[in-house]
Amino acid sequence: MAKFYMMGNYTTQGFQGFVKDPNSDRSKAAQAAADAVGAKMLSYTGLRGTYDFCVIAEGTFEQAAGIKMATEASGALCNITICEEININNAAGNAAKVANAYKGPGK
């Protein structure tokens, strides 16, 4: 299974929910979303900065995309970015193979 880092923001509607219930445990909601599609949530962390939260999960890209679609459609979240963990050395190995085979225009 692949590991995904899903970072996003709460909307005004989402923040209104926090004001109404400051003790809301959003990790439980993230866990329920992962469970619903058969993914495994590894962690949920609130953030300070460009994004309001980061969820780390294992599963398929289609599962992560489904979580993004449904949670953003709820109106409580937006701007969810899905990053997939990769082995950078394997990517570099593939890049080396392509660099030896690919010729740019006019070369």
Image (spheres, grey):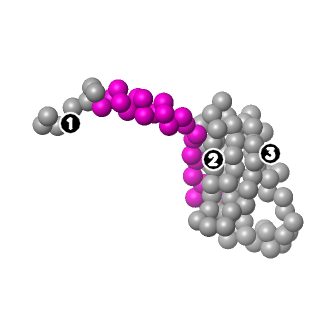
Crowding near pointer 1: few (<14 within 10 Å), some, many (20+)?
A: few
- Up the image or down, 49 lies above or below 55; here it is below
The residue under the point 74% across, 34% down is: 38
State the extent of the magenta-drawn residues as a range.
Answer: 76-99
The residue under the point 57% across, 52% down is: 81
Residue 57: image location, x then y, percent: 70, 42
Amino acid identity at mark 3: Ala
Marked residue nearer the N-terminal end (3 or 1)? 3
Q: In the rendered view, does 64 fall on the left or right side of 100?
A: right
Q: Quadrant of residue 77?
A: bottom right
Q: Number of labelled discs?
A: 3
Amino acid identity at mark 1: Gly
Residue 93: image location, x then y, percent: 42, 29
The residue under the point 62% across, 67% down is: 49
Residue 104's disc is: 1
- For label 2, the residue is 5
Q: Quadrant of residue 66?
A: top right
Mark 3 or mark 1: which is in front?
A: 1
Q: Are marks 3 and 1 in contact (CB under 8 Å)?
A: no
- Up the image or down, 13 lies above or below 26; here it is below
Mark 2 or mark 3: which is in front?
A: 2
Q: Is the N terminus in the top left, top right, bottom left or bottom right quadrant?
A: top right
From mark 2 to mark 3, how far is it between C-alphas?
Answer: 17 Å
- For label 3, the residue is 32
Mark 2 lies on a secondary structure that is: strand
Residue 103: image location, x then y, percent: 21, 32
